[in-house]
Amino acid sequence: MKSEAEQFEKVPTTIYASAGEASRVLAVEVASLIRKKQAESKHAVLGLATGSTPVPFYRELIRLHREEGLSFQNVLTFNLDEYFGLEPTHRESYFRFMREQLFDHVDLPSSQIHIPPGTVSRDRVFEACQEYEAEIERAGGIDLQILGIGRTGHIGFNEPGSSMESRTRMITLDGITREDAARDFQGIENVPRFALTMGVGTIMNARRIVLMAWGENKADIVRQAVEGEVTDAISASFLQKHANAQFLLDAGASQSLTRVRYPWLVGTATWDRSLIRRAVTWLSAKLKKPVLKLLDEDYNEHGMSDLLTEHGPAYQLNIRIFNELQHTITGWPGGKPQEDDRYRPERALPFPKRSLVIAPEPSDELRAMGGTIDRLVEQGHSVDVLFLTSGNLGVSDDAAEHFADVLKELAATRSSSAWKEPVRYAGQLLDDLEAKGPFGEDNQSLRGIKGLLRRGEARHALRATGLDESRIHFLDLPFYENGRYRRFHPQEDDQEALREALTKFRPHQIYMTGNASDPSSVGGVCFSIFRQVMEKVAKRKWRQDCRVWLYRSNEKPLGVYEIDMAVPMSPDQLKHKVKAVSLYATEELSTGQRDRAVARYYDQLGLANYEAIEAFRAW
Ligand code: GLP
């Protein structure tokens, strides 16, 4: 039975505090399915997915295998999809992914593994797909199908337009899907254009389906799939028609569901401060009316009469929220010395402050808060920027090649024998690049060079903010330097390195990001390390006097109701920021639009009309 709060949801949906928790619950379910089938001397047939999402679930299965003796001897697996044209050994093939993430760590016989054959020749594709379907049928159908969800709402690779009856077939990948895979493939040009995927119909035939989604970036597409119409524009929405499908979400991915975002629409809401602000800003946006012009009837007609009873009338409530929003705006992110700070986001003292800007990867800091860094420096605070990783995974082969070419050219114009070594080195670099090709894995020396390039850029870009070079620090956390996208294994030494750095800086304020990211992304991993370290240092004196401000880099921007500090920028300041960000030449970035959009929201609420705003949330 659905609860009142779930009335908008058309498919059973469970929200967990974290991806880890949800994954553990699912692993328990899968383990009991496997054991039940074992007891009946039958196979358990699992449909498996790739991507970052199922990674914590696979880790939990491996743990159950190692520590609790769960055997996979009676399991048959069918993966959803595979890129067309990739050898099973290719480092981005789903075959290799599955081996690294699960198969190599459990006792699943390789003859029981099925993955659509990415290397079949074009003229055999249809036949091979039919064979895949037949194989699933011979296995007796899929008992439990695991799914993630792509940003286009796809399941497997069933891009928009896939029909509910579609079967295993070849598909052209959507532009957004290829963009999302670009990092894994070190550039969008390397991402395959086609894939083989189970069809929606194939998936719907499974006896049970569980779709997992983590992080705020998935929140909007999840809402459309769970609460919207069934449409082939979002293939995950077809799950509404399945008799035994379920969505498992973490807190981030659940954020756009009506019961979470607009709880007053689905029952009696507990009107705490943050909910009130959310409701009032929502109403103002919906009615396209500034906050101060909202009327009692506006509230009453939108399910908020209890809000008025508790906190009304509208006139009073409007003023209160207007003031609250007004007080989030400050040109003094480090606090304004010698001023009454009761209504300012940051306290006046101590002054100057030790401000520590932490960036998971270079460019996060400038994109999200270049203007704020400018101001902090200008206003005399002691600002340090701490990069947790070198960002070398984001540097293209082209950039490394360019560097080697320049080095060679330069050396060729110098006669001194001191240049022999650089020339040799450049040659080696070019050889390494050629040997590995576009799909190969970077060796340590190549990663080293890419890291150097990235650091150079970071220094160059940050200099534009007036920050002294001695204030830029690189921590090179081991999880990143030894790992790669979707395959990060953070450990004790990561926490230790960050703890040491924080203890050294003893900041009065920290700027950090990643809490809204997918937990297995660089930002997500960094934030979880940060959270653990902050728990460890909770009793330290500096910690008790330290505020943490969360910013958003490439994740979903903060909603206006979530903003606790809004730092406005003039057109010139914005221009300056965009210029600084563009100095990160090895990555394509678009800055400015988002900052402008935040300013527009403030304007629509009836607050001052700024050119742009950088937004922060108190942790
Ligand atoms: C790819 C896969 C999907 C997966 C999606 C989301 O498109 N074919 O099966 O659900 O990516 O990936 P992630 O879990 O990394 O967000």
Image (cartoon, helix red, strand yellow):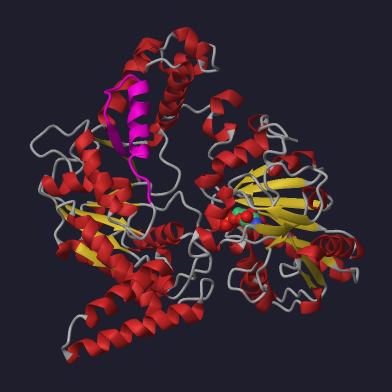
- Give the extent of the magenta segment: 589-614
Q: Is residue 524 magenta?
A: no
Q: Residue furthest left?
A: 338
Q: Quadrant of ligand 1?
A: bottom right
- Between residues 311 and 565, which one lies in front from this camera angle? 565
Write the residue at 73% across / 79% down. 107
Q: Is residue 256 left or right of residue 546?
A: right
Q: Is residue 25 left or right of residue 404?
A: right
Q: Is residue 36 left or right of residue 529?
A: right
Question: Residue 17 appears at what percent x and percent y?
Answer: 54, 49
Question: Residue 471 appears at what percent x and percent y?
Answer: 17, 62
Note whether residue 258 is visible. Answer: yes
Report which quarter residue 611 is drawn in.
top left
551 up-or-down from 4: above or below? below
Q: Residue furthest bottom?
A: 417
Write the residue at 55% across / 46% down. 218
Q: Is residue 593 magenta?
A: yes
Question: Residue 563 appears at what percent x and percent y?
Answer: 35, 36
Report which quarter residue 226 is drawn in.
top right
292 up-or-down from 539: above or below? above
89 up-or-down from 173: above or below? below
